[in-house]
Image (cartoon, coloured by chain):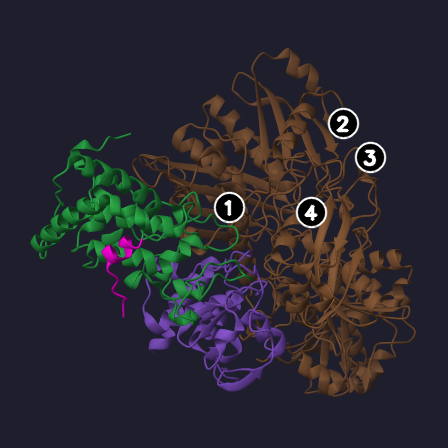
Amino acid sequence: MRRKNDPLLKMLKKRWYFLFFPLLILASVAYSASLANSNKSGYVPITVQDSTDRERSLKLFGEVAAVLRHPRCINCHPSDDYPRQGDEMRRHMFNVQRGNHGKGVIGMKCISCHGASNNLASGVPGAPEPDDPLKSRWHLAPLSMGWIGLNDAQLGKRLLDKEQNGNMSPQDLVEHMEEDPLVLWGWDPGEGREPIPIPHDEFVEILKEWVATGAQVPTEDKEPKK
Amino acid sequence: MITFKVNKKKVSVNDDPDTPLLWVLRDTVGLKGTKFGCGKAFCGACSVHVNDTVVRSCSFPVKYAEGKNITTIEGVGTEDELHPVQKAWIEEQVPQCGYCQSGFIMSTVKLLEHNPDPTDEDINKSITNLCRCGTYYRVRKAIHLAAKLKKS
Amino acid sequence: MAKIIIHAVSRRNFIKTTGLAAGGLLLQGCMKFSNNSKESELASLNAFIKIDMDNKVTLIVHQAEMGQGASTTLPAILADELGADWSNVLLENSLTDPAFKNPKYDLQFTGNAESIRGFHDILRKTAATAREMLKQAAATQWNVPKASLRTENSYIIGKNGEKATFGEFAVPASKLPAPKNVKLKPQTEWKLTGNKSLPRVDIPEKVNGKAVFGIDVELPDMLYASIEICPYFGGRIKEIHENGVRKQSGFVEFFKIPVANPVVAYPPGFNKQEAVAVVAKSYWQSRRALDTLKIVYDKGVNQKMDSKSLYAIYEKTLKGKKWHESVKEGTPIEQLEKVEKTHKAQYYSAWQSHATMEPMNATAKVKGDKVEIWAPTQGQEMAQILISKEFNIPKENITVHRTYLGGGFGRRLLADYVFQAVFLSKKTGKPVKLIWTREQDMQHDFYRPGTMQEFEASVDDTGMPIAMRTKLVSPTILQAVTSVDYVFEGEDPSFPEGIKEIPYHIKNRLLETNMLRLPPPTSVWRTTGFGPNVFALESFLDELAAKAGEDPIAYRKKLVADARSTAVLDLAAKASNWNKPRKKNQGLGVALTHSFESFVAQVVDVSIGLSGILTINKITTVVDCGTVLDPGIARASIESGLVWGLSAALNSEINFKEGRTVESNFNEFKMLTMPEFDIEIETLFINSGEKIGGIAESGPIPIAPALCNAIFDATRKRYRTLPLGKHGVYTQYSADLLPVSTHTI
């Protein structure tokens, strides 16, 4: 069972947030309202009243997106059937494929090599729990959560779209990224792999603040193409 | 003490819990058919079955074998009756140096259990073991033959 | 049809129960051929064939089985000539013996595609001699003419119903003098060889896990060792910090191992690699303990060496003036200067690793001045020589047991790893099995060196070459396995192969060589000198054909010097639909090689996709190796060669950086895999009846030039350096593995 934390309560513990308290209330009301509207229709943009708040939320989203696009995260969030590997995010060697439920194909399942922890002998990374390689959760995110190739607007939209993200509310997203061992692995990826550079707790704070500021994402047409 | 079954026989070993299953099978249990090729789960020479899954045993700490059923190349067939995959391997005269072949066979056995009639594309996805002698052409033929033998 | 191979080694359980380590088989009541025969004939007979009174026929396999089928075809030749019952012969792996030396080299080894062509005649003669002695013994007893007798299924059979087993006459036969000039069976009477595919004897135990490779050897009371060799060529071990290693479970001791000479002492500064080894009670414990040690290296004089600086040495040498004149026919320089129409091109083949699937390993037991070795070795006698020299032990005190080899490809001619195992056994006083990691194996290979050639030709008005000048720059590939100091002789016999003698008739020819001395150790690699040299020659000929506006096969046919070349080219053209109009983006390329006394023509059929993706549609290979003894095995060998050659042509290469090898495992050294070898292949043999040629090394030789010629045919783009990946030429599979921008921002 997931632990249900109240983000507001958590934030209140940090003095810094008191400064933004009125804004937070506004924002949370706004996004609760928007979620209420979005129960069946996937992504619904969250509107905020204050344009400076939107600006701030967008800025925070940029920081969140940078983490999501880090190889340790995005390598298992491909938009196709091929897991990626390495900091250069190339396809996984030896023709490794998505297979059923993102767990590989017969004979070449994720758990054929990836076990219950980062393997010191073989150097193969593994999911920290559960403590049984055959039950290892090491797998690909579903195609609907594929991020590779998306721009910020698309990424944000997909992230928040409950039809695509496994029916997760922004709050659920926070929890996923705060607690899921597979996500946490990104900060403890084992020898020879660059961990996600910003500390996990800082990332979670940013994420929470992004949610608290209305979980704003850029709109498609404004996204600069490079 | 870590206790598990290898080829249906119960074994208990005292190795360091982090020792790769590969070396426990080879040196403690004494089954040398499972081979060390790269130690990094790249080549597949060390492939065995752990319960129903093909596992590269160089990347599987023995502590996790507790209570599980391990099958090695020595256990896929019997003295009297080879596994259809082994028969196909002989029929097509697949092995050359033979060092990597246990791994190919273990992967193929599992492939055919779950996919009795694999296409070339299925084979390309499931059988990615390395063979320096380049027996791939015959491995492919033997997989198709084994599928036929299994059905008949 | 159960056939039994009696191995020189046994499984742990077997050894435990019998206490028997190894060695030649002693059959009770076995009568060896003995007595008045000349010593050498006698030795040869006894070395290869044993027949006991119970009619047990034992044939000795004297060449390493590394997948090439030697353990089937060699005894089959003996059994065929002897008239032995193939389904009941016993096979035994040989030790070292003068009878097993390859007479061309006065050395017992397996390699150079010599197993069949080097021994076919010797084996036939040996078996025929034994057969005639058996017949003579029977003829005397039965009082019939010897000529009226024949042998079949291990029986001696007469015309009037006489019949006896070999065993019944083994003793009287062994007392007879060995006849001279025995008549060999004509090919029409061969039953086991000559266009007959026998099931390989080693395959049953290679599919049930029972085959014993070097890594599988177990001895009572054995210790296990892991090793770290100084990674810097020419570097030294400066300090070893124990770092708590003695507390590691199973730890026994660690040792600094001095420099191992492959067979002879290298010239100063050449491959002097110190190593640290840890001996422990189990292999994994030795690995863990070795990881604990902190080893500090003195990187030595070559620490700035990298692939780029090495390549620059090749280029500089090529532009230099120091050359050894290897071939000079006619007046090449004059002809080149006289004619205006010249064409010049430069080629390069990258460094390659052998990367046998079984990493280097050896087991040794030193007791006093007796050494016993178990190794997956192509160089049984070389190991003996090396250990004898290094430890000052008489050669006859050194027993080298040969196991199955998990790949050889030339690497296992060398005995560096054997030396290390012997060293450790001597130090610990116990049997020691040393196993290298894959990383050690790849970083401490004796590489096929990078090879650079420059070709220049002048052509007549029809575009045919009048004169050809070739420059070859490469380190030695033979010195590591021989006792001759070739470095100071200008060239070794192997490195100019393929361009020294060519299957083409060009009147005026000059070959100049410069044998480099570079820090990384080098040695023979499947294809030997032919690989890189034939790539250059066959690419260059293709360029000349294109310049002349001629069809590449027609052009070659005008130049070839013999009918066998023409025949393989013609059949390759036919089988590959050479003359069929090409589809859009399709290209066919050809290459011809005369190597190891065999002729091979190969046609590669490719398509180049819009994005430049290479698809190999079909590979057609036509082989004339004189007489095909076993088509099944020969075909397997060719198939194998395609993969070997393609790996090197497409992706695999060894690089250097900061004085050491970059690649250390299969993620970096990219060999072909199953999904990439989903290619149609056709392999045809021409039985010309000529002298038997080698096969294993010939198959992979033409693939690289045929492939590049095919790409040229499709695109008019000429690739002169390998691997093709360097030029961005990839199959879809390899292209997919390239890093790509994973997001659009």
In magenta segment, residue C610:
no
| The disc label shown at residue C646, or none | 1
Q: Which residue is mark 4?
A: C231
Hue used for the chain lettered A:
green
- Whole-percent x, y for residue A174 in the image: 27, 55
**Alpha carbon distance from label 1 to label 2:** 32 Å
Hue used for the chain lettered B:
purple
Q: Quadrant of the C terminus of chain C?
A: top left
**Alpha carbon distance from label 4 to label 1:** 28 Å
Residue drawn at x 73%, y 46% is C297
Residue closest to the eye, C694 or A78: A78
Hue used for the chain lettered C:
brown
In this rendering, which labeled residue sits more in front, label 3 or label 4? 4
Furthest-left residue in this view: A37
Mark positioned earlier in the residue sequence (1 or 2) = 2
Task: Check disc 4 and give the amino acid type.
Answer: Pro
Relative to C647, is C490 above or below? above
